[in-house]
Amino acid sequence: MAMRARQKIRAPRRGPTAGKTDDFEKYWGDLSTSLKKIHTKDASDISFELLYRNAYGIVLANRGPDLYERTKALEKEWLDGEVKAQVTAAITSSLLLAREQVDVQDQANERREAGERFLAAIKEAWEDHQLCMGMITDVLMYMDRVLAEHRKPPIYVAAMALFRDHVLRSTIRSDSETTVYSVLESTVLFMIQLERSGHIIDRPLIRHCIYMLEGLYETITEEESTKLYLTVFEPAFLEASRKFYQAEGRRLLETGDAATFCNIATERLREEIERCADTISPSTESKIKDILDNELIRNNLKEVISLEGTGVKNMLDNDRIDVLQSLYVLSARVDDKKAPLTAAVQKRIVEMGKEINASAIAAAQASTLGVGKKPEPGEKKPAEKEKPVNQQTVAAIKWVDDILALKQKFDNIWMKAFKSDQVMQGAISSSFAEFINLGQGSSDSRSSEYLSLFFDENLKKGIKGKTDIEVDALLENGITLLRYVKDKDMFEAYYKKHLSRRLLMKRSVSMDAERQMISKMKMEVGNQFTQRLEAMFKDMTISEDLTSSYKQHVRQASDPDQKKVELDINVLTSTMWPMEIMSNVKSDKVQLACIFPKEIESVKQSFEQFYLGKHNGRKLSWQASMGTADIRATFQRSNGKTQRHELNVSTYAMMILMLFNDVPAGESLTYTDIQAQTRIPDHDLGRNLLSLAVAPKTRVLKKDPMSKDVNPTDRFFFNHDFQSPFMKVRIGVVSGSANKVENQDQRKETEKKMSEERGASIEAAIVRIMKQRKTLIHSQLMTEVLTQLSARFTPDVNMIKKRIESLIDREYLERVEEDPPTYGYVA
Amino acid sequence: MSSSKSSQPDYVTLVSGDGFEFVIPRSTACVSGTIRRMLDPSSRFSEAISGRCVLENISGVVLEKVCEYFCYNEKNKHQAHVPDMDIPPELCLELLMAADYLDT
């Protein structure tokens, strides 16, 4: 306000109250009557201005503190008298007696009605008090303003504290310890208990009572943390809830149904959240959730998961996605890792995987009886074995299919029920890896072989008539399993073997699919893994070129009258192709090269000349066991007619048949004769003779005596009465030409080879590491070797130790120190 | 502006101790904390019911100035630079007392 100087200032008129202390009693008299009227809701004829002026006057007269105290006393009297009476009147005996369990239904009802009346009374008293104190505070506003300097709490706060002490904390009867508050608490908890057991209660009423507790504080400074709700009610509520959910958890476990547990637990969670929002305070939500998580879920989850008959096992088996999902959600609440659930799922996967393993082995073993031994001459009934062997292959493929189905199933569950959870994914993968690699190294584990067979089967037949997308999906599935196989070198060996057969026998349906497969493997396992496989493909391409250029060469050089033998040749790099195909060595005996018929021999020599002329210094070794031949055979029927058939046979069979060109009709050759003239290895000869003379549809030869075995003394005749509805006859070699599950001996062989190869890999890794590090402690060396090789296989620690020993013996390494054992690299 | 509950008239009457009546918008009158509480509809005092406040200890001259200030305050409450209100110096002490009384 601007003020100009030198002007007369009118003195304020003295207020009527100024300085006259004796007026206090009079003013207070007026005031107190009015205040009482306010309490009895009879304020409509009271002038606010008058009251305010009176209070103002009193305060101006420095009697503010007196006014404050008087008002407080007035309030105390009012609360002690009227309000308390009103509230305690609503307390009936049924509210008091049943602090304990209420099981009797009608008693519960009675108590509930009484409780509602009581809560309503409390609510009304509280709301009245609030309203009246609002009005009184307004009237005494001036007093509050002045007294604030005296560090007195506003009259409103003081009055609220009075309500707390003189209504809530008063005893309901002078002779009893029970306070109004304790009745209130037990009543509210009782109501909640009722609601939890499915009754409908008056939520807004309880909410109002909770508002009251939230509006009252322990101290006069009204700090947030001293709300009565937080200090008194909430702990009681949480404790009651804890007890309730402990019991609930026990009860649900006793019912023994995991699905019910999950549903109820989920439902309870929802209920409690709703309760916090509607009935009590939202601030309690996180705390009650903790209680639920702890008491209901965490303490019981493990048992629920393993419940016999209804637990996770059952859910997985029956694809109970919904239940699994709620179980997952519950688990996720209490444990980031969801350990019990994960463990149960893993356990079930491994179980199911073991079942698949077992059934595959059972299927395989059912047939091994027939094929357990090699069909050496003189052995029992080898002709029966073709079927069982196929069965075994079927078992292998079924194994892969089963696993894929299992994987599909769990992927589905993982996506739908486990919300694509990362931890779960890892767990599921590791379980798959676990059972797939189960018993690795022992003869039980055939996963690598089975998987390779699966690819083989599909690349040979399975993908016929399928679209690119389907083929891709199929291969992708296989690759998924490959990911789980730990000993990838084992798989590589089998795959190489199977692939070589496919390539050499031209059994592959689509080269595109083969290449696709290789590139997929490359992506999955790495370059090194597919190097040799790719080299095999390269060999095949080069061989094609070679064959065509050789044909051209022959056309130019040959004399036209020579009997034409057409040659398709595959030149294979010996290191890249699987060894058992390359070697003539069977059972450690050096086998002499077999003797080809002279027509063939000349072609062979001509090609050798041609090839060596191109590539100097190379050595060609001929693998008759892998070849096939198309020959045209003429059968002189006994009725004088002649019948021609084109026979597609193996090279060995061709050689055998060619012998009969020089044998007069009716004459025979013995087994030993044939062997002497061809030098076909025993094993192969037996098999070929079986397919030529015993296999029912392709009996080009007759055998004497007619039996199912081939014995060295058996005699063979050319069968001129050979009948076939087809012009072209394909004569497969019994066992071996198709890719089948190995028998025990073959397996042992493969394993032996595997371990040799691994030994070499390990040595290479050791030398690589040591060359770089020069000296290294034993344990460190071990770790490095293990990490380097883990992509291909899991090396055996003992094997590494042996390799280190051997390297020391050969003076690549030396022992530098004993403690800790340290090695040095010898340059 | 004023709390436009249908039951509440938009204008209220202020009466000075010597009988002058001033009819001003409710929102304007509520610049004063005292008057605001006096008229608060939730407290059922006679002023709240009748919409008429008799201010016994304020004279008409002062109340006129007070009402002028209420309007001045209401008009300028959202503005940053406000011209000073003209206050007759002879009234200023009484006005100060009124301001204290009315919690303005």
Image: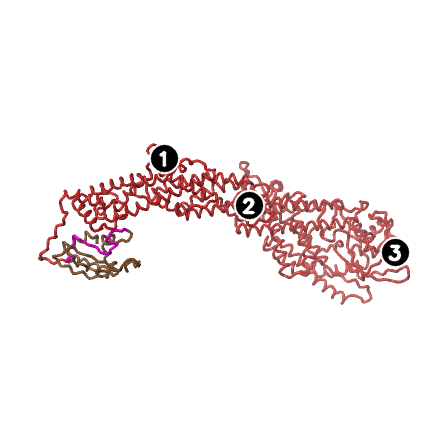
Q: Label 2, label 1: how many angstroms apart (C-alpha)?
A: 44 Å
Q: Position of residue A257 (x, y in %)?
A: 56, 43
Q: Can residue A785 be seen in this view?
A: no
Specify the chain shown as red. Answer: A
Which kind of residue does numbered mark 3 sit on?
Answer: Val
Depicted A207 relative to depicted A510: above or below: above
From the viewer's perspective, tell me whether residue A368 is left or right of residue A405.
Answer: right
Specify the chain shown as brown. Answer: B
Q: Are marks 2 and 1 on the same chain?
A: yes
Asked if the magenta segment contains residue B51, the reply would be yes
From the viewer's perspective, tell me whether residue A563 is left or right of residue A209.
Answer: right
Where does the N terminus of chain A fall, quadrant-wise? bottom left
Chain letter, disc 3 residue: A
Check disc 2 and report the residue beneath it: A259
Say what secondary structure mark 3 lies in.
loop
Q: In the current view of this chain or complex, which residue is farthest to the top?
A: A175
Chain letter, disc 1 residue: A
Which region of the structure is painted magenta? B43-62
Q: Do the residues labelled 3 and 1 touch (CB within 8 Å)?
A: no
Q: Label 2, label 3: how many angstroms apart (C-alpha)?
A: 80 Å
Check disc 3 and report the residue beneath it: A663
Check disc 1 and report the residue beneath it: A178
Depicted B12 relative to depicted A392: above or below: below
- Comparing A683 with A276, the one in front is A276
Q: Position of residue A785 (x, y in %)?
A: 57, 45
Which kind of residue does numbered mark 1 sit on?
Answer: Thr
Q: Label 3, label 1: how many angstroms apart (C-alpha)?
A: 122 Å
